[in-house]
Image (cartoon, rainbow, N blue to C red):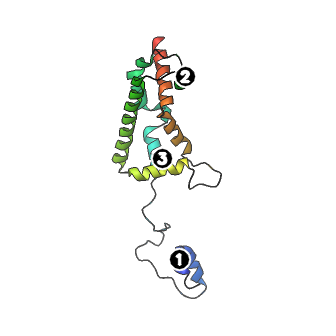
Amino acid sequence: PEGAVGQQPERAAARAVEGSGRTMPRDETKDEDDSSDGDGPEFVDMIAACKDYFGEPDALPLLERFVEEHSSKFAHRQSLDASEEEQDLVHTELHREYLVRWEAAIEAFLSEKAFSLQEFQTQLRDAVEDRYCALFEEHEHHGWVDSCFAAVSYEHFYRRMVAAARRGRHK
């Protein structure tokens, strides 16, 4: 139909007029073999770049150094489960300090790569919410993003610190 051509994607529009003998106007700004829809810049998978840069969330050198520096402050803890004991203010302050370091590392990475923080946050949300993948499938980065969130949680931080303190006592 005449009015629908401009509302359809380029290729569908081209097919719609093929049999009519009319030609589609050529967009001089596009290359002939350009398969993108022209709606913006090419997609950059920031999460994949982040995975390559930082590795597995449970083995982050940043956390390992922090554990080495501060785990002795958790030596008096009996349980690996943070919910079983009242938490010391020192421990929650150390966790906040760790989060500040982690956020600074992420921000430095994004800056180094010239990535937008807002776009990165959008991609993280898309991964966690399994957007842009087939129905009933998990986003390819869902597990890694979940692992990152878990790795910076207080419970995970506490468990790592107590475990390291126990190893230090048995050396």
Residue 121, horizontal then vertical, whole percent: 44, 49
Residue that protrudes farthest toward the front in the picture: 86
On the question of residue 45 being in view, the answer is no
In this rendering, the label closer to the viewer, 1 or 3: 1
> Rounded to the nearest whole Å, what is the CA distance between mark 1 and mark 3?
34 Å
Is residue 74 shown left or right of residue 144? Answer: left
- Of pointers 1 and 3, the one earlier in the residue sequence: 1
**Res 84 label:** 2
* Residue type, label 2: Glu
Residue at 55% from the left image edge and 75% from the top image edge: 8
Q: Which residue is mark 1?
A: 7
- Asked if residue 76 is positioned above or below residue 159 in the image, the reply reads above
* Residue type, label 3: Ala
Quadrant for residue 9, please give it.
bottom right
Label 1 close to label 2 by CB (< 8 Å) = no
Quadrant for residue 71, please give it.
top left
Residue that protrudes farthest toward the right in the picture: 136
On the question of residue 59 being in view, the answer is yes
Is residue 62 shown left or right of residue 14? Answer: left
> Rounded to the nearest whole Å, what is the CA distance between mark 3 and mark 2?
37 Å
Residue 79, horizontal then vertical, whole percent: 54, 19
Is residue 161 shown left or right of residue 140? Answer: left
Residue at 47% from the left image edge and 28% from the top image edge: 157
**For the residue carrying disc 2, how many other residues have a C-alpha within 10 Å: few (<14), some (14-19), or many (20+)?**
few
Q: Which residue is mark 3?
A: 48
**Res 104 label:** none
Query: Looking at the figure, which quarter contains the N terminus?
Result: bottom right
Residue that protrudes farthest toward the bottom in the picture: 21
